[in-house]
Amino acid sequence: MQPLLQDVILAANPWLERPGVFAAATAHRVPDPFQERRLRGMEDWPLPGKAHVIIGARQVGKSTLLWHWFRDRDLPPLFINAEEPAIRAWCSSPTLVLADIRGLIHPGTPVFIDEAQHLDDAGLLLKRLLDGGLPNPLFVTSSSSMISMPPGFMSP
């Protein structure tokens, strides 16, 4: 992994280097008070070999819902913010992303790609990650339905 990219990822994921700081480091991501929401099928998460994609309008709580879900389970994800230019460039090579993820986190760690609509071809990235055998649960948010994926690819 390129050093600049590694710095960007570690800055967004301080819990990777300092276990035990997840709840404190993400406190600003779940507002107080929080109106709890549930999605149909959430009780079955994570489903192996599926991308759990939440698509909706801007500012409706897609990311907040996931941060709350991760925090309830004390399950710190690898957070990938697709608004970051270095991340967008990295995501243009699904093979590189897959190799870097495998070298950075263990198989049980969820991968959370936020704001996927900023990626040039988010559907292809997700497909190639799963087809490539990503051993991690995969969660994605997007404020656009422009992510095109084959039927049956996403969880219900």
Image (cartoon, rainbow, N blue to C red):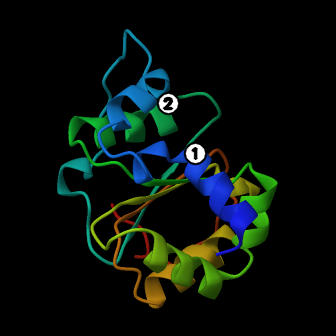
What amino acid is at disc 2? Gly
What amino acid is at disc 1? Ala
Describe residue 23's horizontal placement relative to residue 1 as left or right: left
**Lower sequence index among marks 1 and 2:** 1
- In the drawing, what numbered circle is on residue 156? none
Give the image location of residue 10, x and y in percent: 56, 52
Residue at 37% over, 9% down: 33
Describe residue 7's horizontal placement relative to residue 109 as left or right: right
Describe residue 154's horizontal placement relative to residue 98 as left or right: left
Give the image location of residue 64, x and y in percent: 45, 32
- In this view, the residue in front, 103 or 132, is 103
Q: Which residue is mark 1?
A: 12
Q: Quadrant of the C terminus?
A: bottom left
* Mark 1 touches mark 2? (CB < 8 Å): no
- In this view, the residue in front, 151 or 78, is 78
Give the image location of residue 93, x and y in percent: 70, 82
- In the image, residue 141 sits, relative to residue 127, either above or below, namely above
Badge 1 marks a residue whose secondary structure is helix
Q: Which residue is mark 2?
A: 61
Alpha carbon distance from label 1 to label 2? 19 Å
